[in-house]
Image: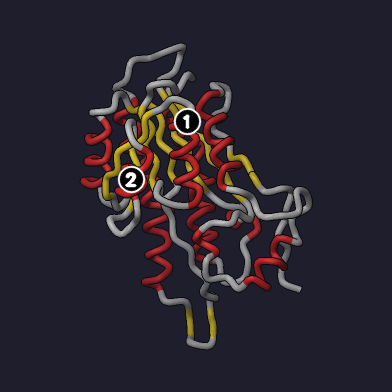
Amino acid sequence: MDITGCVVLVTGGASGLGLAAVQKFLGAGARVVIADLPSSPGADIAAELGEGVIFKATDVTSEAQVTAAMDAGRELGTLRVAVNCAGVSSAVKTVGKGGPFPLAEFSRVIQVNLVGTFNVLRLAAERIGEAEEVDGERGVIINTASIAAFDGQVGQTAYAASKGGIVGMTLPAARDLAPLKIRVVTIAPGLFRTPLLANVPEKALAALSNQVAHPARFGRPNEYADLALHVAENAMLNAETIRLDGAVRMGPPQ
């Protein structure tokens, strides 16, 4: 799909992987709606990036706010791509020193990461489905999971469950949306240096990066963005979860 002039909705677009996706799609000729929390620097980023970018304060779990973000994007053109990058992390053991994992915290992670992703997917799919078909397709929805969906670590029960849910819904969602000529692809990043790792000690980060086979380092947000753009442009990529992880396979703690 030629994304030149298309509107791309990027949730979590004010930082990390989402911001890299915003910059990549904008540079490739698309127009972008940054959908992120009102506390994010999204408005300043949109102003800095200039023409072709708008910011809309958005909680991805809110139907009204996601709809409003897509409505705002109409001034830029036709929505054809949605990139789901909004998410939260959690590091709580199922049973720890303070007792069992608080159910409210588990529900929060599932609500933002899994329910929020599906909320954007379903609403964006409806909107993309109204677009004119071009070269046999109307658009694509790109979700973000994590290698935690497959190699979840200690303290990642909620996070791994939320990301595993995104992986699990990729194929059925793609099948659901095939009649509308809309593709669904999930990217499962490995160890990327993003704000989600901001509270992890440097010693622990170094130990993690040593587990990456090649290249032996953390992923860079622009590498995620490169893949997201390729997914949008490659019409044969559909119903797939792509690990982007430098061949890391996270084993159990030693």
Q: Amino acid at mark 1?
A: Gly
Task: Return the disc, 1 or 2, that comes first in the chain's sequence.
Answer: 1
Please indicate whether residue 254 sits to the left or right of residue 36 in the image: right
Residue 52: % across, % down = 33, 31
Q: Residue at x 38, y 65 (%)?
A: 107
Distance between the alpha carbons at the discs numbered 1 and 2 = 18 Å
Relative to 189, say whether 24 is above or below.
Answer: above
Label 1's element?
helix
Is residue 138 among what the camera can see?
Answer: yes
The quarter of the rendered structure image containing the C terminus is bottom right
Is residue 169 among what the camera can see?
Answer: no
Tell me the quarter of the picture where residue 81 sits. top left
Query: In front here: 231 or 226?
Result: 226
Q: Residue at x 28, y 27 (%)?
A: 76
Q: Which residue is mark 2?
A: 35
Please indicate whether residue 161 sits to the left or right of residue 36 in the image: right
Q: Amino acid at mark 2?
A: Ala
On residue 27, the disc is 1
